[in-house]
Amino acid sequence: MNERLFFETRAQLRGNTLAGHAAVFNTTVQLRQGLFERILPGAFEQALRTSDVRALVNHDPSQLLGRQSAGTLRLQEDSTGLAFEVDLPDTTAARDLRTLVERGDISGASFGFIRDKWDRTPVDGGVLETHRQFRQLFDVSPLTFPAYAATDVSLRSEGDAPGSQREQLIRLRAKNRGTS
């Protein structure tokens, strides 16, 4: 039975679409000594209406994966955070990324932004910045060192719907490895 599960999961990892969350809501992370950050639900609504976001590898503009205005990148807020889905191009950067995600080397993501509304609150040992609204989004990026450990990326084949049994197997595999 375990061999079958592994086979189905490996087949799923051969997909052409990268999906995940570049940010998660209501999770506090430490960005550096004394600086903590949290994002509230609804913080991306304005930016999603006014930005033309790119999907990049490690925030590197020379490693473009997709673009919102081209229809190759889709973004939305869901109950978890900022969800993205990008159709991977046939480029060296995308092929390399696909391999790194398949192996579990890259399992998280991030986003580039200009903030609009936020609060700074003293907390034990520093300051907590709570983001209420982002003015603009520049990119979403699968990356090597995500600040938010709860972000995720996975591959799926065309036609696999979010939440499908095959996608759930991928996420279960990542969770069991401790990378979700």
Image (tube, rainbow, N blue to C red):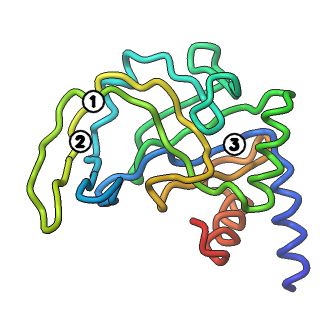
* Kind of element beneath mark 3: strand
Q: CA distance from mark 1 to mark 2?
A: 7 Å
Quarter of the C terminus within the rendering:
bottom right
Residue at coordinates 38% horizontally, 29% vertically from top-left?
A: 113
Residue type at mark 2: give it. Answer: His
Name which residue type carries label 3: Leu
Tag in front: 3 or 1:
1
Counting from the top left corner in percent of width and height, residue 167 is at 69, 58
| Residue 30 sits above or below residue 76 on the image | below
In the picture shown, does residue 115 fall above or below 7?
above
Q: Residue at x 12, y 43 (%)?
A: 119
Q: Answer with mark 3 or mark 1, whichever residue precedes in sequence.
A: 3
**Which residue appears at 62% of the width and 51% of the height?**
144
Q: Return the residue nearer the eye: 51 or 97.
A: 97
Q: How far is the residue under mark 3 from the one under mark 1?
A: 26 Å
Label 2 element class: strand
Q: Nearer the viewer, residue 34 or 89?
A: 34
Q: Which residue position holds label 3?
A: 18
Residue 18 in the image: state x and y as whole percent: 69, 42
Question: Which numbered disc covers residue 115?
Answer: 1
The quarter of the displayed image where residue 177 is located: bottom right
Instruction: Single out the mark in the foreground, 2 or 3.
Output: 2
Label 1: element kind: strand
User: Are the residues at dot 2 and dot 3 in contact (C-beta closer than 8 Å)?
Assistant: no
Q: Nearer the viewer, residue 52 or 162?
A: 52
Alpha-carbon neighbours of circle 3 within 10 Å: few (<14), some, or many (≥20)?
many
Would you say the residues marked 1 and 2 are in contact, meaning their CB atoms lie under 8 Å apart?
A: yes
Q: Amino acid at mark 1?
A: Arg
- Image check: 76 left or right of 87? left
Q: Which mark is residue 131?
A: 2
Give x and y (percent) for residue 165.
Answer: 70, 63
